[in-house]
């Protein structure tokens, strides 16, 4: 079972554990899409950066993307189609007007999950990048900044009615968006057939930057058959140890 872990430590350690991948192994199609004022841009994350295989099922994507409408962004994400998504992305509004953004990250999963438990968390920073003396990041129309998705549908959300501000030239403020599914009992999730994802929805002031660190994990719930098989395996292992004594 996967558990939520410290995002910063996980990403900083990636350079030391690169998996020796085979040439015939292909990375998952990890995609992002940016919507601003009805205009969409984005695509496969590796098209704007690099992808490195970290383990048999884990991949690290990092890159940069700037469009012609005055938005630039960067990302560093560790993903696993088994599945989880964790990482950081930063976005700068380089225009003279505030903009409402929706940024979707989507990952195909394998295998499908008949019944899941889910967990997630998020945090971030807001920066007055143009030195105007103020910056703001708010929820768009009072919605949630972070939404976990399964097959494109709502699972859980965090940071509704957000209103983060900075009031000093080139100042920065940090914020916590909260978490879900990290206690006991586990938080029940949906069946997941094809994808998991994280959606960010926010309005950012002109000339300023915001950065989000987050995670979304889905774990399959063992079927009764799998539980019985696990019990028999455990009993067989115990008998084997007793005979060897």
Image (cartoon, rainbow, N blue to C red):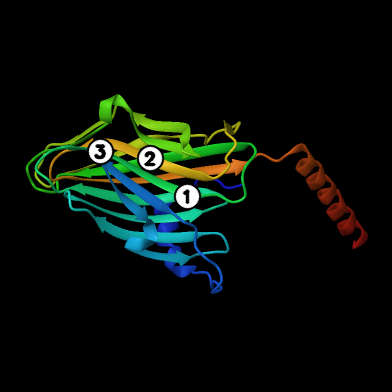
Location of residue 76 with respect to 17 vertically, above or below: above
CA separation in Å, label 2 and label 3: 16 Å
Query: For numbered disc 1, what is the local secondary structure?
Result: strand
Q: Which residue is mark 3?
A: 38
Q: Position of residue 204 (x, y in %)?
A: 20, 38
Determine crowd level at label 3: few under 14, some 14-19, many 20+ residues with C-alpha closer than 10 A: few
Name the quarter where the C terminus is drawn: bottom right
Location of residue 53 with respect to 4 vertically, above or below: below
Contact, mark 2 vs mark 3 (Cβ under 8 Å): no
Query: For numbered disc 3, what is the local secondary structure?
Result: loop
Quarter of the image where one finds residue 51: bottom left
Q: 39 left or right of 118?
A: left
Q: Position of residue 100 (x, y in %)?
A: 23, 36
Q: For the point 54% across and 53% down, which residue is it? A: 81
Residue 112 seen from this side: yes
Q: Which residue is mark 2?
A: 199
Location of residue 54 with respect to 66 vertically, above or below: below
């Amino acid at each position: 079972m996967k558990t939520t872990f410290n995002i910063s430590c996980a990403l900083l350690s990636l350079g030391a554990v690169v998996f020796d991948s085979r040439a015939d192994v292909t990375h998952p199609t990890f995609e992002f899409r940016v919507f601003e004022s009805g205009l969409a841009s984005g695509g496969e994350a590796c098209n704007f950066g690099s992808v490195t295989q970290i383990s048999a099922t884990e991949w690290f994507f990092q890159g940069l993307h700037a469009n012609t409408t005055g938005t630039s962004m960067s990302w560093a994400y560790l993903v696993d189609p088994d599945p989880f998504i964790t990482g950081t992305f930063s976005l700068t509004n380089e225009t003279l007007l505030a903009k409402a953004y929706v940024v979707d990250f989507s990952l195909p999963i394998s295998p499908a999950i008949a019944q899941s438990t889910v967990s997630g968390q998020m945090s971030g920073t807001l920066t007055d990048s143009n030195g105007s003396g103020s910056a703001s990041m708010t929820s768009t129309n009072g919605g949630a900044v972070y939404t976990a998705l399964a097959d494109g549908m709502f699972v859980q959300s965090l940071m509704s009615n957000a209103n983060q501000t900075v009031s000093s030239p080139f100042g920065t403020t940090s914020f916590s968006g909260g978490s879900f599914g990290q206690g006991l009992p586990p938080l029940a999730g949906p069946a997941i057939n094809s994808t998991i994802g994280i959606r960010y929805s926010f309005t950012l002031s002109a000339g300023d930057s915001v950065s989000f660190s987050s995670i979304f994990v889905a774990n399959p719930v063992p079927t009764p058959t799998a539980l019985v098989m696990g019990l028999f395996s455990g009993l067989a292992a115990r008998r084997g140890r007793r005979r060897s004594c």
